[in-house]
Amino acid sequence: MFCMKCGQKVPDNAKFCSRCGAEIKAIATGIAEDEPEEKETGIAVDTPAEKAEQAPTETSSTTPDPQAAPQVAVPATPQPAPKKSNRGKIIAAVVAAIIICAGIGIGVWWKFDQDQKAKQAEWDRAHVTLITRVTGADTPGFDDAATAIPVQVKGTDLDGNEVDEVQFMRPAAMQVETKQGSYDLVFPGGYFTSDGQAVKAPGTTVHVDVALDEQAASGQQGTAPAPEKAEAPITIDDPLTYAPIDPLEVTDEQINDIAQWTAQDPDDNGKADQLKAAATTKRDEAIAEKKRQEEEAAERARVEARKAEITQTAEEYLYTIYDNNGERGRQIRQSRPSTTMWGFVNGTKSLQSGWPNTKMVSLNDVHAIDENTVAYDLDYSSSMGNPPKWSDKHDSGTISFGDNGLIDQWYPEGSPNGRLV
């Protein structure tokens, strides 16, 4: 059995606990008294305490056994008081250390993050796209319906990367966009106007050193995001004079060169090919018009030459007829092969070589009406009678010519003989 106070194992017939000295019976009885009453089942059940009480009565009397060892009460061993625990303080210290370390870590991380953001912002500002304006360019016929103007950008950016690209200027944006760096801007090819006029490039190369505006850069501090684009601190104001090419002089090579450059525009949408065809048509029409004008001029020249020829022939003819006694008539007749007017009239027709006793006073007018007819107006004197008497007369009329330049008909309106053939 066991001591109910300290739990020490004791002999079944022990009266006292050998460890704490507690009376086994008293403890057993006390415990028995605290036990709940047995249910009234009609069956008697002995409790441990009752068994403990009954055991000595069955074997001995109340007189102690002289041979039994005396029972000595053993005082109870005092139990040590529980020590106060330091666990809470340790936990608190650990938590505080964790919080401090976390705070330091967060601070270090925040500082690193801010430094990285600042470096990124600085890099972004250094690599912002800069707009270089092209001002003062003379671009005749350049509007939104024309092709864009190509600009070849060649050079090195601030990171040392080689740049060789083609950009395109438009009426609302005469500009070039680059990163910081050093570049040559070449203006090749040219452009087509909306009506197909080919305009050649000025053949100019402009060198520019593009840098970020320090004042603008100073306004962007810390981690503030850089703008997408910014104005470059320079502009191109060199005189860029584009000149239209005379449609009569433009060549297929020039047209193809302009089309090759302008077709690289990503926003061209086929405009370069359309205006290339228009430029070719314009050139062909100009050549055809020039040919027509040349033919008309040649025809006019031919007509004028014929008019001059028949006018000269008519003048000589009139002097031959009306200046029989005059010096000019004699000179003309002497230059002819005969006095029968050969060389003036067609076929075998002949006329008397001059009126008898006539002298040209003045040939007032002789001019070609067309390439086959000459009109004339003159005054002459004639001698009639015996003795001869000179009198002033007036005559006018027309002379018609055949295709061979010889006289077909003479219509002297005031001639004494009327119409002559």
Image (cartoon, rainbow, N blue to C red):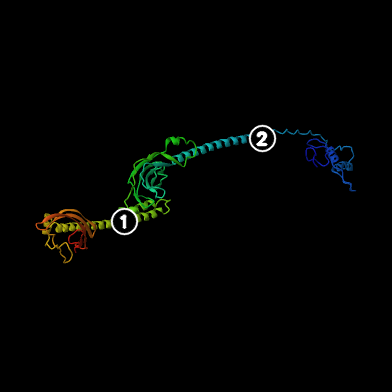
Residue at the disc numbered 2: 88
Query: Percent from the top left, x then y, of residue 35?
Result: 84, 42
Question: Is residue 293 toward the left or the right of residue 85 in the image?
Answer: left
Query: Percent from the top left, x then y, of residue 298?
Result: 25, 57
Question: Is residue 342 toward the left or the right of residue 191 in the image?
Answer: left
**In the rendered image, is residue 158 in sight?**
no
Kind of residue at badge 2:
Gly
- The local secondary structure at tag 2 comes to helix
Decide: is 148 above or below 348. Answer: above
Badge number at residue 29: none
Question: Is residue 180 toward the left or the right of residue 86 in the image?
Answer: left
**In the rendered image, is residue 130 in sight?**
yes
Instruction: Give the Cα separation between the discs numbered 2 and 1.
Output: 109 Å
Tell me if mark 1 has few (under 14), some (14-19) or many (20+) residues whose alpha carbon lies within 10 angstroms of its own: few
Q: Quadrant of residue 156?
A: top left
Decide: is 320 above or below 68. Answer: below
Quadrant where the image shows the N terminus: top right
Q: Earlier in the sequence, mark 2 or mark 1?
A: 2
Q: 417 or 201, which is in the foreground?
A: 417
- The local secondary structure at tag 1 comes to helix
Q: What number of labels is visible?
A: 2
Residue at the disc numbered 1: 289
